[in-house]
Image (cartoon, grey):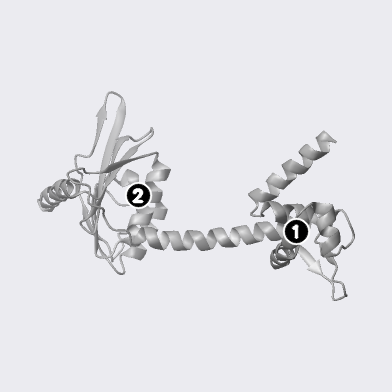
Amino acid sequence: MAELQDELSNITESLKSLGLTKYEALVYIALLKVAGATATEIHEISGVPRASVYPVLDRLIQRNLVSVSNTSPKRFDAMPPEEGISNLLTSIEANAEEAKKVLTDIFSQRVGVERGTQELIWSIYGMENIHLRIADLIHNAKQNIRIFSSVHFFTPAMIDTLVTAGDHVEIEIIVDQWPGTPPRNLRLLIKKPPIGHEIGNKNVAGGVFLFDCNRVMVIMGPQDEGLTGLYSESDGFVRFFSSYWRFFKDWARKE
């Protein structure tokens, strides 16, 4: 008896993790035990208070977990577990996609928060994570993108994203070389800059990515190991690397 109670408790918690309330889980489980039941019978089988049974059944019908007959009194039946759980998962995925869309819109429109003299700098580890953040920054740029970097950091996916963004924002890039024909909507200054060098036996490279003159991503580290990105929207950080960009732009224009 104790084992059965524990099993019921466990499956109830599992259903709650899929978005059901305790009473909804208990009613659904109760209906799986019988081939159709009235509200009174469901109350007796599930232990859910009589006054709560109908509101719970209404919610389960909306979730496509329970069907109802047109007889009098009404009889309720549970969807088979395979179909019921599939319906729950479909609903969760749809809600998650909607939440992601709304939260992404909120994130893309966020504004800075005054924090006194504190300037926030975030560290991002690993090339994959850095590329994902840069792709997001490129996508949300409104006016201009300025890059001073080794070609090592330009993946085909990043180049495609830059070319797409180049149709609506100004993009300037200082780079040591370029794979293939330079796209027409990107302003390239191709010159061997002093951003790649060896320390010991390791080839170290760096890159500076400026977005709309108010966000900066700086990348540095050994090319064959884990890289680190420093991201900030602080005025001091942005001013420093904007000056850094202008210095190397002037340098790159010289013969």
Of the residues shown, which amino acid type is indicated by label 1? Gly
Q: In which quarter of the image is the N terminus?
A: top right
Most distant residue in the top direction = 200
Determine crowd level at label 2: few under 14, some 14-19, many 20+ residues with C-alpha closer than 10 A. some
Labels 2, 1: front one: 1
- Where's residue 216, x and y in %? 25, 49
Most distant residue in the right direction = 35
- Where's residue 189, x and y in %? 20, 54
Left or right of 231, for residue 17: right
SS label for mark 2: loop
Q: Which mark is residue 154?
A: 2
- How far is disc 2 from disc 1 in space, using C-alphas? 46 Å
Quarter of the image holding residue 237? top left
Left or right of 38, for residue 193: left
Q: Residue 84 carries which label?
A: 1
Determine crowd level at label 1: few under 14, some 14-19, many 20+ residues with C-alpha closer than 10 A. some
Rendered residue at 22%/47% (across/down):
115
Quarter of the image holding residue 19? bottom right
Left or right of 25, for residue 3: right
Rendered residue at 14%/52% (across/down):
249
SS label for mark 1: helix
Compared with residue 111, is residue 207 higher up or lower down, i.e. above or below? above
- Where's residue 97, x and y in %? 54, 61
